[in-house]
Image (spheres, rainbow, N blue to C red):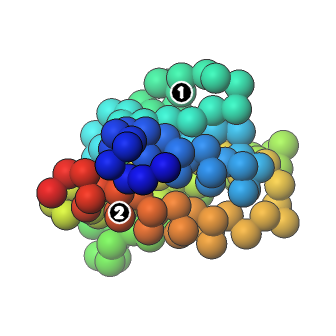
Amino acid sequence: MKLLEKSGFDMLTNVLFDMNNNGKFPLSILTDKDGLPIISAANDGEVPERQAAVIGFIRKTSLQVSKLMGWTELEEITYSFSNGYILVNRPFNVKDNQLTLATIVTEKNIPYQEIMSLAITEIQKAWDFYWK
């Protein structure tokens, strides 16, 4: 399908579902800087509003810690859990928008950073195309 035959939100949703399939991720979500969900994709059809609120909180807290410590911009925020799952938050910018792509990694041998980096590139392309 050509880009013009889909909406921008359709393209972003497809990027997230592709990322989930490639990484065997159960869900992913794209939020704004305040943690408000822009788009999400979940294998079980769940709308991860609660996860979006957590992602926004994590981003704000991590940015505060980074500033207090005098560290540079955050590249990735991860939380590892006893069940082996990893919650990954990747803040990035598109034009003047601060966004966060988040997912849950359920298999340690999956190259999630590479998969998420590809998704971020695709999100930036779609954003540039649809929201000029």
Q: Residue at x 28, y 40 (%)?
A: 34
Q: Is residue 2 left or right of residue 67?
A: right
Q: Position of residue 38 (x, y in %)?
A: 36, 37
Residue bearing mark 2: 124
Q: Name the residue under label 1.
A: 48
In screen coordinates, is 104 left or right of 110? left
Q: Residue at x 52, y 61 (%)?
A: 119
Instruction: Residue 10: give x, y in percent of width and height.
Output: 43, 39
Q: Where is residue 61 in the image (x, y as percent from the top left)?
A: 37, 49
**Residue at point 84%, 66% (across, down):** 109
What mark, if any, has residue 129 been given in the picture? none
Res 17 quadrant in image: top right
Q: Residues within 10 Å of mark 1 (few under 14, many from 20)?
A: some
Question: Where the C terminus falls, by quadrant?
Answer: bottom left
Q: Tell me which amino acid carries mark 2.
A: Gln
In the depicted view, which residue is nearer to us: 2 or 24?
A: 2
